[in-house]
Image (cartoon, helix red, strand yellow):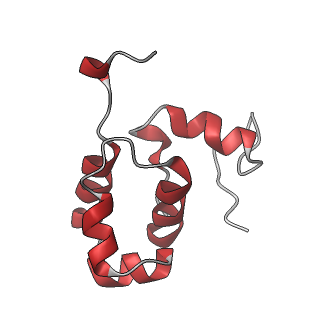
Amino acid sequence: MENNSSKIHRGSILHAVASRHERSIVKIANDAGYDQSTFYVHIKKDDLPLDILFKYGKSMNHDFSNEIPEMEEYLLVNGLRKSNDKSLSYD
């Protein structure tokens, strides 16, 4: 089991990245398949699922594996990145 004291708050990271992005929260959320109110629910979740983060990352053209190490494995396991490739496949 993970040690909660060192757990990364995924929602906070999403909020930080989206807040710095050139596009509005509304546009980011809509392009990820969510509405603005759902975005605000998501940023409160410390254990926000990686598939949701991937959708936001796709919307912002952002790779969350730099901030969230588990994202790297998620991308590899789901065929979204090759093991020797740092680029994402958003197809």
Left/right placement of residue 73 relative to residue 14 reads: right
State the image coordinates of residue 74 (x, y, percent, origin top left).
63, 41
State the image coordinates of residue 19 (x, y, percent, origin top left).
22, 65
Q: Is residue 16 above or below residue 30?
A: above
Residue at point 48%, 72% (across, down) = 59
- The image quadrant where one finds the C terminus is bottom right
Q: Is residue 80 above or below residue 61?
A: above
Left/right placement of residue 22 relative to residue 32 reads: left
Q: Is residue 22 visible?
A: no
Q: Is residue 72 above or below residue 60?
A: above
Residue at point 38%, 76% (across, down) = 28
Residue at point 49%, 74% (across, down) = 32
Q: Is residue 17 above or below residue 38?
A: above
Q: Is residue 79 visible?
A: yes
Number of numbered discs overlaid on the protein picture: 0
Residue at point 43%, 77% (across, down) = 34
Asked whether 9 or 27 is in front, the reply is 9
State the image coordinates of residue 73 (x, y, percent, origin top left).
63, 34
State the image coordinates of residue 88 (x, y, percent, origin top left).
65, 54
Asked whether 67 or 29 is in front, the reply is 29
